[in-house]
Structure formats: structure tokens, C-alpha cells
Amino acid sequence: MWLETLNKLLYVSKGKVYFTLKIASVLTALMVFGLIVYGFGFYLESEEMEFVYHCYDLLILSFLINYLLRLLYSFKRVSFLKRTWFECLLLSVVVANFFLEDLYGIVSQRVFYRNYILFYLILLSGYEFVKFSTHINLIKFRPTTMFLASFVLLIGVGTILLMLPTSTEGKTSMPFIDALFTATSASCVTGLIVVDTATFFTLKGQLIILLLFQLGGLGIISFATFFSTFFTKGVGIKHQTIMQDIYSTESLVSAQNLFKTIIVITLVLEFLFFVAIFFTWGSQAQFDSLGQKLYFSAFHAVSAFCNAGFSLYSEGIYEPVIRSAYLLHIVIAVAVILGGLGFPVLEDIFNLHKMRERLKYPWKDWHLATKVSLYTSAALILFGTVGFYFLERDHVLKEMNLTEQFITSFFQSVVARTAGFNTVNLGSVSEATAMILIFLMFIGASPASTGGGIKTSTFLIIFITAISTITEKGKVEIGRRTVTQDTIFRAFSIFAFAVAYNFTCIIILRISEPKMAFVDLIFEQISAFGTVGTSRGITSSLSFVGKCIIIMSMFVGRVGLITLAIALSKRAVSTSYRYPNAHLMVG
């Protein structure tokens, strides 16, 4: 009886209190982020760290009061506890640790805060941000605009974190333009660098870069969607629409099913490549400890699969101690290939349910998009391998035996399409070889992958359309399917925009960098646009204007020209009319 009376008293103010508590929880999570940045990003005295610890106390108390008030205002309190089990578990552990500390003194205060309170504060804050992301339906933006905004947010936060004094060696902050360049390169999984990742950054800075290209490769929205399905009631139509647009799925249902397996497949593959890399470093690679070897293996596994191209060696995979570790090169190349195929393709290939179906019913085949991605990628890799071998066998490959020459040619062909590793000095290859690499970089990876470029499907559609036009076939067919006019128009639009954009950027680079070789500037620009990350050694010498152009190109290459154009354009008022046919001379 008293519960009914309490509920009636609370009912009047429930709406206002719930709204206030939601705002308070987000603000508290932001304060946690700010305190973490302050506590770990700057060199603080012991008194200042004590102040940070006391602030942690207040924030924990704020989370606890917020949760108890929401429990109080929830009329179905048992259901509320079941629905918020994760948050309840976190707060219970924190409160239990407080009692253990006060009553029994099990651990010292400093160790307690560092190992328990901070950890749970991060989890609680992350949980609040996940819950907040489910309200994306309230934001009146197009899905493409939200996709762009997520990368702008990631780059902005990454730039701030990399500028913190403890992110770099010494006690001075990284210059803004260099921090922005590095954050963009990592978030857009490119790999171009203006400073040496191995020596310029501390462990904290390297971990920030690792987090940026992991989030950038999969997308913040994908991560938020994944965790929302576990810890909240799910995601709305707007959220699913964004996922459908990102991964080019046929329906909202397929988009919802896809993102549930993307993260799992990614983490499983990254773990497998981590294990493979750990055992293939070669005898010349020396590590200070087992922990360092584990860290190097994990960093390069994620970097390879996300097609980021970042390395903890100053010369990348061309470092003398691993230059001849050819098993390692093959493992990294396979990781790059799988990361560049596209998440829908990986889901189609590695989904356990589909694998069982194909074994049970052999006539069931991969989707057409999967076959297009696989066969086109294989053809481009073969073309690049053969071209690199014959052009460089008497040049940069002349000191290697035949097997080593083919592995090196294969590796450079693979990474040229999407990842920024290299096992030869690209500044020494001939201009003919450089042009082949530029061609591969311009095409890039497959749709809905971590790579950039115009994409393999775009290239195939343009190529087949050209053949159909020459043979006067009248229609474009792929795999016993007719390609729609909308798809053809989109492919040619992407190609035209890409050519125009890169042509403009190359002209600006030529003006801003007059002393640099023209082929090096073309190589750098296409590498940025294709989010490849390979360079002929001019990145760190670029001027302010040159760095700005490359930053913009990395961003445009990652989000896509069409996505950017749609996000910035206005919708047509009406297309329900048709003018008479125009007769123009072409060719």
C-alpha cells in the first residue's frame, strides 16, 4: 500500500526528474573524461593527483545517486534492475571496494584508485555514452551527415589527446598541425606520418593511435551499436538507417543482423593475426621482454587488419631486423587483404550459419558482391605483383632470390591498394613502378571496408560498362545479373569526382611544394586519397598548406566523395518529370 502512495507522489515530477538525471549522467561522464585527460595527460605533483582522486570520489557518488534516484522513480523497480544489470553490477563492485578499503584496508588508497575506481569510472562513463548514442533518432541530420560527424569527432578528440604532454617524449606538447595530421591519419586508417611513431610518442601516445585506428577502421557508430544491443533496449530506426548506409545493405533488417557479427568477426580475426605475428617475427627481431613482444604483435595485428599501416619500427616493415622475416610479411599481407575485402564480405564468408548452409547445400554460393570483391581484388593483386616483379627484379629486388622477390612483389601489390606498409624503399623504385602503385592506390579496397579509393566494385562497373559500350551490347551484366542505371551513374560519378578532386589537390601541392619531384607529389596525394599511407619519403617535409591538403584528402578518402557530397548537398525538390531526349556528340 505504501508503495502505491509513494508512486503517486513521485508520478508528478517523474518526467522532469528523469530528464534532469539523463543530462546529469552525460555531464558526469564528460567530467570523467576531462579528469582522465588532466590526470594522465599532464605531469602532476602529488597534491594535484590527490585532488584528482577526491574528484573521482565525487563522480562515483554522483553516479550512485543518479542510479538510486532512477530506481526510486521507476514504478517497476525489479524490471528496472534487470534492465540496468550492467550499471548495477559496476556500481555494486565500486561500493563493495569502498567498504573493503575502509573496514579492512586490503589495498592502499593509491593502488585502490588506480586499479579499481578509475577502471570502473571509465566503464560507467562508456556505458553512459552508449546509452546516449541510442537517442540518435532525436538528431535531425541525414545518416551520411552523422557518419561524417562521427569521424570529425574522433579526429578532434584524437588531436587533443595527442597534444597532451605525456603523449610525446619530453614535456612539450605536439604542434597542433602535426597532431591533427597524425590523428586524421590514424582515424582514417591511412598511415602517413610526419613524426616517427616509434620514437616520438610515449606508450600512452602509441595506445591513443592504436585506439584511433581501431575505432576509425570499424567506426564509432558500429561500436556504439554493438554495445547498445547488449546493455540497452536496442537501437532505433535512425541508428539502423545509418548502419545500412555505411555498409550498403539491402534492408534495415540485414543492417541490424550485420553489425551484430562485424565486431565479433573483427576481434576474432585480429586475435588470430596477433598470434600468427607473435610467432613469425624472425630470429633477428629482439624484444626487451615478453610484454613488449606481445604489445608489438597486437599493435601490428590491429594495424594490418584495419589497413592503418602504422608501425612501432622507425622504418616500418623495412626495418633491418624484420626486413627478411618473409613469413611475417605473408601474415601481414593476408591480414591486409581480409581487412580490405569489406565487412559484408567477411560476414558472408565467415558467418558460421552460412558456412554450415554451404556445406549442407553445395549449390548455395556467395553473394554477388562477395564474388566481385574477391575476384577483382585477386586480379588487381596479381597485376600488381607481376608488374612490380618485372619492373624491379633488376633494381630493388636484385639482391633477393626468386622466392623472396615474389613475396616482396606480392606484399607491395597488396599494401598498395589499402595499407601503408613497405618492405622496400619506395623512393628508390622506378617511376613506371610508382605509376602502377598509384593506379592500385587510386582503385583502393572494396566497399564497406577500412580502405579508401574509388573501390574495386566501382572500377569493375566502369570497366565492364566500357566493354559493353564498345561491343554495343546495350546493357551491363555481372554474374548473370543486370547492373542498374543508378549503380552505373553512381560509379561514374565517383570516378569523375575522384579524378577532379585529385587533379585539383595535385595542382595545389605542386604550387605549395615547388622543390619536390612531381611524381612524389602525385604518389603522396593518391596515397592519402586511397588511405594507403605509403610514401616516397616527403611527408614530414610538407609545408603547412601541403599538410592541410593531405589531411583533407585522407578524410575525403575515408568517408567517400559521394558520401561527402550527399551530406553537404540539398535534396532535389522533385524528380517526377522528364525532359525530351538530348542528342549530343560523344567521343
Image: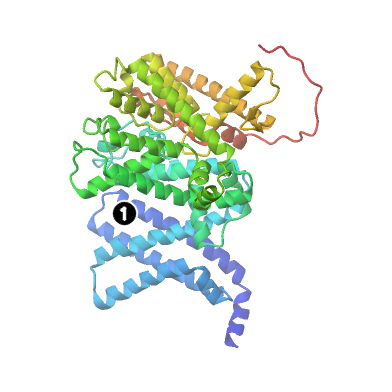
**In this orientation, does residue 209 appear?**
no
Mark 1 lies on residue: 39
Q: Is residue 102 above or below residue 342?
A: below
In front here: 106 or 457?
457
In front here: 273 or 132?
273
**In this orientation, does residue 102 appear?**
yes
In front here: 298 or 149?
298
- Residue 344 position within the rendered picture, expressed as x and y whole percent measured from the top left: 53, 43
Graded by Cα atoms within 10 Å as few (under 14), some (14 to 19) or many (20 or more), the crowding at tag 1 reads: some
Examine the image and state in which quarter residue 91 appears: bottom left
Residue occupying the point 54% across, 43% down:
147
Residue 21 is left or right of residue 202, and the answer is: right
Residue occupying the point 61% across, 19% down:
467
Residue occupying the point 28% across, 38% down:
312
- Residue 433 position within the rendered picture, expressed as x and y whole percent measured from the top left: 39, 17
Residue 117 is left or right of residue 65, and the answer is: left
Residue occupying the point 66% across, 31% down:
483
- Residue 107 position within the rendered picture, expressed as x and y whole percent measured from the top left: 24, 69
Q: How many marks?
A: 1
Which quarter of the rendered picture does the C terminus lie within?
A: top right
Mark 1: amino acid: Gly
Q: Is residue 530 above or below residue 156?
A: above
Which quarter of the rendered picture does the N terminus lie within?
A: bottom right
Q: Is residue 405 above or below residue 16?
A: above
